[in-house]
Image: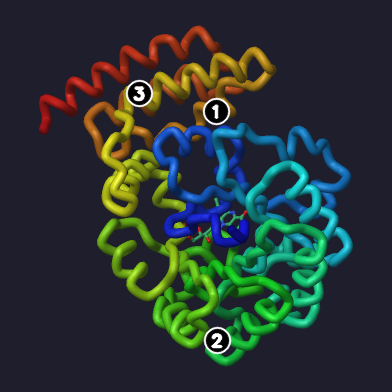
Amino acid sequence: MDIKNKINRKISVAPMMDCTDRHDRFFLRLMSKNVMLYTEMVATKSAIHGDRKKILSYSPEEKPLALQVGGSDKEELSEVAKIAEDMGYDEININLGCPSKKVQKNMFGACLMKEPDLVAECINEMVNSCKIPVTAKTRIGFDNEERFEYLNNFIHKMRDAGTKTFILHARKAMLTGLSPKQNLNIPKLNYNMVYEIKKQNPELEIIINGGISKIDEINKHLNHCDGVMIGRSIYQNPYSLVEIEKEIFNTEVNPTREQVAEQLLEYVGKEVKLGTKVNHIMRHTVGLYHGQKGSKEWKRYLSDNLMARESDFQKTKHIMTIVQNNEKANQANT
Ligand SMILES: Cc1cc2nc3c(=O)[nH]c(=O)nc-3n(C[C@H](O)[C@H](O)[C@H](O)COP(=O)(O)O)c2cc1C
């Protein structure tokens, strides 16, 4: 079977800087075997010249996993595509959607929507240097450029260069005047534009992204697109992945929060021995009890004991007491 057909992108967790690092992905994987995971964006120069073990290593449990790269130098991008393949990543994704000033200064992210020919050349080089799928994540427009024809032509150029999978964040990027955070909220969502791209390009895999969290919303989008990518709502409420497993993938046996915490602590134990700081892992678990009884106690314990720079591994032992109390309180509640 063609490797490109093997990846299931029905649901994926969005790449998020400072959030979806390897520890967070390991934690998310404890709750979902079926979602596709993405790294935070890694600049080509860091991937090539940086401490590769630190920047690019991952646990095998995280797979299937895509490396997201930021860059616009075709040689560098093709080198990173090869590195990604050699390191066992399942996909390499190019970031064409980040509007931050720093990213623009380095000529990657959303400003590349202005340069469709350059993007096509970069993709072509990447496709020729590896066998894993090369995918693109972009916005539906930028600044005053919001025409369907522009986006469709941009996608066609990338398709002709060898990309078959597109993740479309359904709002435009404002390259000036808005902060990165505002750029995730202020430009209006336009899901219909993404649906229309899929309708006019049925042969392409179109993944929709932006402002999606509930199961009924996911199901609605899946009627129009091939997949849904979710970012902030999963980071804030990671256990919602279990609902996704049940409702979207029909997974019958799913872990309780208690089982997730137990397995994560085992991982923390192993990682601490390798030199990882407890807070680098536990900071991702703040939302484990989102919307549940005991959520406040959980957050308080983490912030008082486990999220400080020098947090103590011994203190993770007390976590299971909080978890068990929370389980009881929530069971009594149902
Ligand atoms: C903290 C944070 C960091 C992000 N970092 C990246 C990134 O590295 N690469 C990227 O393509 N998008 C990044 N994004 C954008 C997300 O991938 C996603 O497109 C956006 O949050 C919209 O999806 P959502 O509404 O489901 O969160 C980031 C978003 C947030 C909130």
Disc nearer the start of the sequence (2/1): 2
Residue at 68% over, 77% down: 158
**CB of mark 1 within 8 Å of CB of mark 3?**
no
Q: Nearer the viewer, residue 169 or 75?
A: 75
Residue at 57% over, 70% down: 166
Numbered mark located on residue 237 in the image: none
Q: How many marks?
A: 3
Q: Counting other residues with Cα less than 10 Å from the Cα at mark 3, is it few (<14), some (14-19), or many (20 or more)? A: some
State how far apart marks 2 and 1 are (Cα). 40 Å
Q: Nearer the viewer, residue 98 or 37?
A: 37
Residue 210 in percent (x, y) is at 45, 65
Seen in the picture, residue 104 relative to 249 is either above or below; the reply is below
Numbered mark located on residue 281 in the image: 1
Q: Is residue 79 visible?
A: yes
Q: Amino acid at mark 3?
A: Gln
Numbered mark located on residue 259 in the image: 3
Disc nearer the start of the sequence (1/3): 3
Q: Amino acid at mark 2?
A: Glu
Q: Secondary structure at mark 3?
A: helix
* Mark 2 lies on residue: 146
Q: Secondary structure at mark 2?
A: loop
**CB of mark 2 within 8 Å of CB of mark 1?**
no
Q: Counting other residues with Cα less than 10 Å from the Cα at mark 1, is it few (<14), some (14-19), or many (20 or more)? A: many
Residue at 72% over, 50% down: 42
Residue 51 in percent (x, y) is at 82, 36
